[in-house]
Every structure is written in C-alpha cells, then in structure tokens.
Image (cartoon, coloured by chain):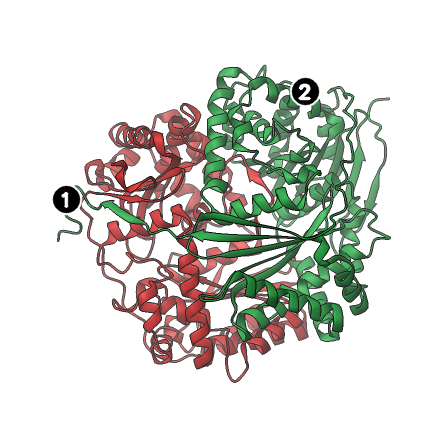
Amino acid sequence: MQTKQLFFKLPSPGVFLVALLFCLPQVAQAALTIQHWTTPQGARVVFVESHELPMLDVAVEFPAGSARDPADKPGLAQLTHSLLDQGAAGLSDTAIAFGLADVGAVLSGHLDRDRGGVTLRTLSSSPEKDKALEMLARVLQQPDFPGEVVKREKKRLMAGIREAEADPGNVASKAFYRAMYGTHPYAHDEAGEIDSIDKLTRGDLQAFYRSHYSAPNAVIALMGDITRAEAEAIANRLAAGLSQVPALPALPKPDLAAASDTRIAYPSTQSHVLMGVVGVSRNDPDYFSLYVGNYVLGGGGFDSQLMREVRDKRGYAYSAYSYFLPLGEAGPFQLGLQTKLAQTDDALKVAQFTLREFIAKGPSEVELTQAKSNLTGGFPLRIDSNRKILEYLSVIGFYRLPLDYLDTWVDQVNAVDVAAVKQAFARRINPDKLVTVVVGGPASAR
Amino acid sequence: MQGMWGLVLAFAVAGAQAAVTDVMLDNGLRVIVQEDHRAPVMVSQVWYRAGSVDEFNGTTGVAHVLEHMMFKGTKTVPPGEFSKRIAAAGGRENAFTSRDHTAYFQQMQKDRLELALQLEADRMTNLIISDELFAKEIQVVMEERRLRTDDQAQSIAYERLMATAYQAHPYRRPIIGWMDDLQNMTGQDARDWYNRWYSPNNATLVVAGDVKADEVIALAKQYFGPLPARALPTRKPQVEPAQIGSKRIVVKAPAQVPYLLMAWHAPSLKDWEKDTSPYALQILAGVLSGNDSARLQKTLVKTQQIAVNASAGYDAVSRGPALFMVDATPAAGKSVADLEKAIRKELDRVKREGISDSELARVKAQVIAGEVYQRDSLFYQAMQLGDYVTAGLPPAALAGRVGKLRAVTAKEVQAAAQQWLKDDQLSVAELDPQVLKPQAKNAAVSGVRHAN
C-alpha cells in the first residue's frame, strides 16, 4: 500500500541502504564478538551471540543471484529463489506459510546480482524456534518445485516485471546496467526477462537449485539468543541436508564500457538521469578512498556537492546522489537525479560539471574532515540492532572479508586523505567514458 | 517553581521492556522517554501536531513545504547549518510529514542528545523563511510530487481514491498538496503555517535509547523550557458525512498492468480501553493477508489465480477517521471487475461464516512475536510512541495493544466485517493502464559499448 509519510530527503532504506551495507563497518563495539567456523559439510558460518532480546535471526545465502543466470535464461535465479518456500519436503506452500505464522516466525527472501538467500526471524523460546528452524531446513534442503506452482509463479514474476515498467526510475535503472555491462552477467535485471521466464521449466529450476544451493556454496549467519553450541548444531543441521556440489568459481571480470548515451522516450513528467562507470569490487584496495570521497561528491546528503549544486542552489531535483555499489566483481559507480522534462539538459550539465570538478580537484580538507567525522561518529548506528548486525555477518561471510574488518573500519576511514581520494577517483572514473541514460519525454523531443 | 511538570506516568511496556516516562513541561511541551540500553545510541524526535489534516484549500501541501523550510536557517543558525552540525557529530537526520503530524529526528551516539535538542529548540521558534529560499525549495517539492505521485500510476490511483472516499474531511487532500496549490504557494503561506502551529504546546519530544529519563528531561527543560506557549487555533472536527452509496472511479495513467483499490470507512482507535472494532479490524486484516497463504493470497493468488497480488490494510491509529483497504493486481487476462467480484466473495465469506479458531490463533501468534521483534528497532519504538501520542492516544494504549488484540474473539471479527465492510461505505478506484512502450530515442549515440 501507499506510504504514510513524505520525507525531507530520501530516507536511507532502499538503494542507499544497500550501498551502505556493503561498506559496512562494524564493530568497534567491544561487545560485538564475531565467531566464524566451517561446518564439516563446508558451509561457512558467522555468528554473534546476544541474549538481550528473546529472538534469533538466521540468514543463509548462496552465490545464486541473477548474475548466475545462464546467458539464455535470465530470470532463472529469481524464479528458483521464489519457489523455495512454495512447497518443500512434501509440505504445500500453505502448510509452510501456516507452520511459520503459527509460531510467529517470519521467513523472507533476498536476491541481488551476487546473492540469493533466505532469512528467518523467530522467537528463541523452545517450541517456536524448533518449528521455525524445521521449516527453514525444509525450504533450503528439499524444495519440491511443484509443476502447477512453477506455472503460477512464472506468471506472477512476469506480471511483476510488467508492473515495474510503470516506474520510469526502474526503466532507467535497467537500461543503465545494460549499457554499462553489455554481455557481462551483471547486465540484466535481477527479475530477468519476460520472454525467457516464459520458457523456463521445472527441470531448469531443479538443475539451478542443485548446482547453486549446496553446502560448500552456503554462508550461514546467525545472530541472537542462542549459545555457540546451539549455533553449531543449527548450522550443521542446515548444512547437512544440502548437496556437496563444490563451490562455484568467481564471475568473469567486467570490461570497462565505452562511453554511451541512451535516451528512452517515456510518458512521464520528469526525466530520470543516470550516469556512471564500472566501479569497484568488494575487495578493491581503493575502496575506502572512494567510499569516503563519495560522501563529499554525492553520498553525504546535504553535505554532498551534488545535493548542494542540483537541489539547494537550483531546485532542480528532490534527490541527487552518487554511490559505489561494490559487488563480488566490480559493481557500478552510479550518479542519479530526476527533474522535470524541460530542465533535463540543464540538470544533466550541472551533474556532469560537478563530477568533473570533483575528479579534477578532489574534496577540500574541510569537506573531507566533515565526511570522516560523520562516518566515524555514526559508526555505532550501523550496528545498533540485530537485523543490521545480521546483514553485516552475511556480507563478511559471503565476500570473505577479514573478521577484524569491523574492528579496523574506523581506522580505515580515518586513514583516507585528500590525495588518496583524488588519486582513486582519477584512476576509477574517466569523465569522458561515462555511461549515461535518460528516460522521459516524447520520442520526438531529441 | 522551576522544574515542575504536569504529570508523570510510568508503566511497563510488553514484558521486560523498560518503563516509558511521560511528562509535560510548564510551557506545554510533552516529553516522552523510552530507555533502551542495548546499544550506545539514541534517537530524538520532535513531533508537531500539525499535518495535512490541518490545511485549508488553496494551500494544500503547506505542512510538508514548511518541513522543508525548517532546514533553511534561524536567527543564529545559517541555512544548511543544522544538517551540517548533526552530520559532523556523526548523526543521521531527516523529517517527515503525514496527514496528522510533522516530525523531525536525529539518530546519534547517546552523548550527543544535547546538540539535537539545542538545535530543535532553536528552530521551534526562531525559524527564518526568506522568499528567496522559499522560491528554490518549492521547486524541489514540486519535483518530489512528480517523482512520488505524478509519474507513479498506482500513487495517482491512491490519491484520487482518497479524494473520492472523503468528500468533506480533509483527509481527502494529498499530503504533498495539489500541484496547482504548490505552484501558487508563497513564502507567506509557509510563515503563516509556522506561526500558527510551531510552539512547545503543540509538540511532543520523544527520545529513545541509551539515555536516562531524568537527564533527558533536564536537557529538555534547559532548551525548550524557556520557549513561550502560544494560543492554538480551534480545530474543527470536520466530520465526514455518512456515505450513502458506493462510489467508483476510473484512473487512466501510463502503466502496463491494471490495479484495484477498495476502501471502506472504518473507525479509528479513540478510547483504547473501550473500543472493540479497531482491534477486531486489525485481526481481520491479518486473517485476510497476514501471511503468504492468508485468505486473499490463498484464494485469489494461489487457488483461483485471478490476482498476482492482493492484500488488506487497516491503520487504527490516526487523529481522524480510518479506512479499511484492499488492493490487488489482476492476473494477465483477468479483468478488474472479475477481481473485485472475487474479493467481495471472500469478504462475504467472512461475514457469513466467520473465521476459524486456527486463523485467529495464527494472527495472535504473529502479533505476540511482532511485539518482541519491534524492540530490535529503536527508531520504530520511538515512531510508535510519537504516532500514538500525536493521535491523542496515551502511551498506555501502546503498552496495552497486545493484550487487547489477544482478547479479540472470532465472533467479534465476523461482527466487525459485517458492520464495516458494507457496499454503501465502499469507494473503488480502478487503474486503467494506458499502455506504454518505452522506446529508444537514439541508443548509444557515442561509441561502441564493450569494445574489448
């Protein structure tokens, strides 16, 4: 349903949260001790014990995101993922839904380009937790992919893609990834494509499931009101029922795209402008310089140059931003804004100029100090809830970040200086090689 | 005598949860503190009881525009400086406007509350709204309207349905305002709004987190205490005349897929101890769409496959009246009319046969667990307190919510469906998609992509 509130600026959940989570820091709080081990079946486990609330969160993730779609079957990862809880180990979709709800448990899915997984939130009291974990195990280990349900969910997924076409921002985002990634598996949307989904079979889903949802591919994150011994037992139980298909190789490295300028007609009142380049992977040595520097360019809300130039000074847009989305391989650097059709070119020029200036001159000392103050001073907010910590655990496990990543995060931010930002941006962003997408306005306008 | 406040209330929320402190300063500012010591952080929110419901025709959207102007400087804090200082202290901040209220918040380390309170107290009375900055910001707000409403077909359908379901009550007007009103709004409209509603006796400060209640209250008194109370305008009830027959509208907008919205007039929670329908309607919404195989999903999406999505919603907490809503997207090849028929059939089944004991128990199990899960989010806890209090409900209503929901019987749910989900009380909006085909104007004008 519709949201109840309007915000002064885009609230952090949404795309910005995704971007932030990856750079997530963690720790620093002495209280947050991360434990890590591998189950006998080869699943990697990341665990934080916390007894303050009587609840448990479990996330199990696999390299089963949309980038793992076979080239001729975009949408297979998404469809497979959405079928997991729609019938498993002989239980119907309804029996699973009721089994979870009867004990107040919440099962949710997550799928992006790299990762596909399932998250369970349950009370930690005994009958509830046991029942909820039993459902989680069934869903992960024995999805049935019933033929009739596959047919139904295909239609729903296709309808969802059609529905999303009513959102010009979504149209722009899809075109942006296509233009930037070409034939690389990051190019297509997580949801896949209608023509391809239409042809997928139950056999396709079973094969994808077998080769991706295996124990050596699994990362199990646990957060909450259980002991280490319990966590081990739960992880073993979840991993034991998964196949032993070996861990998948990494994705190919994307090439840098040549400059391009894509204009798409759309009956909207605004143009959605996106521009960017192929950015960095999760383990890139430039990552902190880029992340901290981007706060000044377009990540720091009203502290950022983009918000100042596009929104504050000119009133061109409600939202103007930039971010690096680090993935397993190089994810995008993306800059975006939306503005009424008539001022599209003006806003585009301001954004381009701001980016060029930033790459040429870097942040000022004052701006960089402000960025570091906010990021380091706000660090405790990044780990102030079980849900946030669970997401960090998944990221650390999945991307094999060092376990002390969180302990050193504040130091890594503090170590960034103006020269490092300038050099990193100059290395990574060639303003003559931007991929630009503009969605909006009549076909005859240009 | 310095330092006395009107009333002090403390009570336990949901089991182990710490007590809520609720006090009133002499100038009418209400201060609510929820201690939660899990993490060394806090959230501070200032809620004003002024939302779009308080606006007049011709200046719709002004509550939200003023929210934007609140960041544009005071006598001592230059434009943009508020955000800069909070950010420098590691804080996150934002503000939001709803039909019932406007609220401003900061999330920070626990020892930085003083900065937040100092800045909020300053802009409660010292705001400067220049015509020059207003002229810029109103452009931003119009872009926001285009982004959220004008280019979102389902949002348009929702906006037009509200304007149909309510004919007299101000909930008929969109929070963001009609575009024509935004285009004709002046700096003086914003200044009038600020002078009318922004005063301590129309505000509530909610602080949650790793703080001590007495210290929060002392700080609140230090910074907000000196601010003078102001006479507030009388608020007229503006009761919606009884609907006497169903209403329906068709909304044509660019989209690929149709969409159906149905809304029945329903009561909101007023006397939290005596009211019964609002609790029964919350349970009903859970029975209809509280899990992946609840009635609407099971029947419409999974069995009949007439819809690809269907859900029910009801928000009992508001200053004005409420609506019980159902929204759904038809499956390919199915009409909105067929879908509406199928939804009505499901609702009739509840009215005729009631709900099962297991359905009731299931929703209650979710409510009880949900109460624990909510405590994982400091922000959400503060949001709920502010939402309740601004709607005129005491924090005790929030603490008593689970007990009230647990007491609802299957018979009460059936009776509520019979009483409130009547055709004469129904308004329907159908999104008639004006099919669009995104077309490339000129793809890749410069260069070849992915030359290896």
Can I make out residue A122 in this image? yes
Q: Disc 1 on helix, strand or loop?
A: loop
Amino acid tagged 2: Asn
The tint chain B carries is green
Left or right, B210 with reference to B68: right
x, y percentage for residue A232? Answer: 52, 73
- Res. B201 image quadrant: top right
Q: Nearer the viewer, residue B446 or B253?
A: B253
Can I make out residue A116 in this image? no
Q: Disc 2 on helix, strand or loop?
A: helix
**Among the two numbered marks 1 and 2 on one chain, the one whose residue lies closer to the N terminus:** 2
The structure residue drawn at horizontal position 55% and vertical position 82%, both measured from the top left corner, is A91
In the rendered image, the quadrant that contains the N terminus of chain B is top right
Left or right, A165 with reference to B394: left
Note whether B200 is above or below A116 in the view shown: above
Which residue is under mark 1? B447
Amino acid tagged 1: Gly
Please, which chain is the residue tagged with disc 1 on? B
Mark number, residue B195: 2
Q: CA distance from mark 1 to mark 2?
A: 57 Å
Left or right, A257 with reference to A379: left
Give the chain ID for the red colour. Answer: A
x, y percentage for residue A295? Answer: 39, 36
Q: Residues within 10 Å of mark 1 (few under 14, many from 20)?
A: few
Please, which chain is the residue tagged with disc 2 on? B
Note whether B190 is above or below B148 in the view shown: above
Note whether B122 is above or below A402 in the view shown: above
The structure residue drawn at horizontal position 75% and vertical position 35%, both measured from the top left corner, is B31
x, y percentage for residue B400? Answer: 80, 54
